[in-house]
Amino acid sequence: MWITDMRHFLDDNGMPVVSGPPGRVASYLGGIVLALGKAPFDELVVTGIPCRRRPGRRPCPGHICAIKRTNPRRIEWICPQCKDEGVIYNWEGTYWDREPLA
């Protein structure tokens, strides 16, 4: 289970880290945040993002499903094929957040 604070993938200027392994993880998890975009809370979204796991050194054929939750605010995601899963916190107000500020 991945437990992620998206602020950890931002540089001092609030922009995503882009190089090396942290940049790849930021791109992957940021893509999940972007895919939920303006989706309502508590509504499951099939993102179309391919799973990044490689069970048995073969690419997982699954695609990520995710849902935004309200209390506490978080994004829960899972690959229904291999069961890789995680929770993303503190995405609001970051580079990947496409919701208008209230």
Image (cartoon, helix red, strand yellow):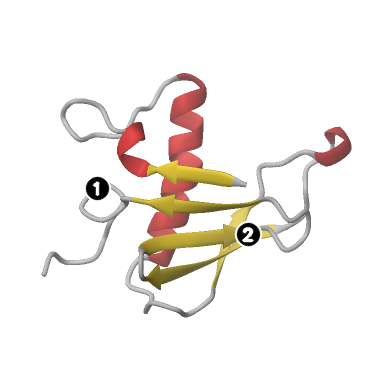
List x then y, in percent, for residue 86. 56, 52
Could you tell me the amino acid type at mark 2? Ile
Relative placement, left or right, of 2 versus 58 is: left
Q: Residue furthest front?
A: 71
Q: How many marks?
A: 2
Residue depicted at 78% across the width and 53% down the height: 82
Which disc number belongs to residue 78?
Answer: 2
| Element at label 1 | loop
**Viewer-proximal residue among 90 and 9:** 90
List x then y, in percent, for residue 93. 20, 53
Q: Which residue is mark 1?
A: 94
Residue depicted at 66% across the width and 59% down the height: 63
List x then y, in percent, for residue 30. 41, 47
Q: Is residue 14 above or below residue 64?
A: above
Residue depicted at 62% across the width and 47% down the height: 1
Mark 2 or mark 1, earlier in chain: 2
Q: Is residue 75 above or below residue 60?
A: below
Residue depicted at 78% across the width and 59% down the height: 81
**Viewer-proximal residue among 6 and 20:** 6
Could you tell me the amino acid type at mark 1? Thr
Relative placement, left or right, of 76 versus 13 is: right
Which disc number belongs to residue 24?
Answer: none
Q: Residues within 10 Å of mark 2 (few under 14, many from 20)?
A: many
Relative placement, left or right, of 86 versus 41 is: right
Relative placement, left or right, of 101 versus 43 is: left
